[in-house]
Image (tube, grey):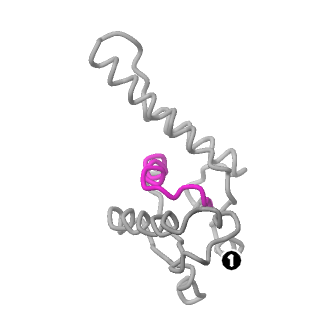
Amino acid sequence: MNMINQLPNVQISGEHDGQLVPMQEMYEDIERNNREVQESGVGRYIDPHEFLCWVQKWFFLHTGKTCESNIVHGFKEIRYRDPDKIRFVKKVFPCAKFVLNYREDPEGYSLFLKDIPIEDREEFARSFEDFHKEFPVDSFLLSLEQFSEQKW
C-alpha cells in the first residue's frame, strides 16, 4: 500500500474488517423487499441506488477522505474472496478497478489464512480468475509470486 500511495492523487487505505459484508446483506434484503412490493403491491419500495450511494459515502468517511474526482481511492481487503462479494464491491463502485492478488502456491498464505483448507485457498485463485474473465478491463490479476516493480 505504501508504494501505491506514493503515486500522485492516489489514496489506498487498509482493511475495513469486512464491513461491506453486512452492507451486501442489507442490499440483498432491499432487493428482496422490492420484489415482494412489486408482486403484492403492498409495502414501501426502497431505492437500491440510494442505498449504494450511502455505502460509497460510508467508505469515503471510513477512509477519512472525501470523494474527490481527481483522486483515485481504493482499499486493501483480504476478506472478499468469493465472487459474489467482489461483484457487490463492483456494484457499489461501478467505475472501480481491481487488482486481484492471490498466491500460486496455496502453501504460501499468510497466518490469517493458514487455517483455511488448501482446497479453499485454491478456490480463491479460481474465483479471482472468474471475476477477471467477467471484468477483464476493470481487473488486473496478479499472483504475489509475479509481483515486481516492473509490473507497477
Residue located 39% across and 62% down the image = 131
In-front residue for pair 26/127:
127
Residue 119, above or below 92: below
Residue 104, above or below 15: below
In the rendered image, is residue 25 in sight? yes
In the rendered image, is residue 11 in sight? no
The secondary structure type at the circle numbered 1 is: helix
Residue 85 falls inside the magenta stretch: yes
Quarter of the figure that contains the C terminus:
bottom right
Hey, what amino acid is under mark 1? Answer: Met
Q: Which residues are magenta?
A: 75-92
Residue 14, above or below 140: above
Could you tell whether 76 is left or right of 136 in the image?
right
Residue 41 on image: x %, y % = 30, 11
Which quadrant would residue 29 be assigned to in this image? top left
Which quadrant would residue 2 be assigned to in this image? bottom right
Which quadrant would residue 80 be assigned to in this image? bottom right
Residue 68 on image: x %, y % = 60, 53
Residue extending furthest top? 42
Quarter of the figure that contains the N terminus:
bottom right
Residue 106 falls inside the magenta stretch: no
Residue 112 on image: x %, y % = 68, 63
Residue extending furthest left? 39
Could you tell whether 31 is left or right of 61 in the image?
left
Q: Provide the residue designation for mark 1.
A: 3
Residue extending furthest bottom? 150
Total residue callouts: 1
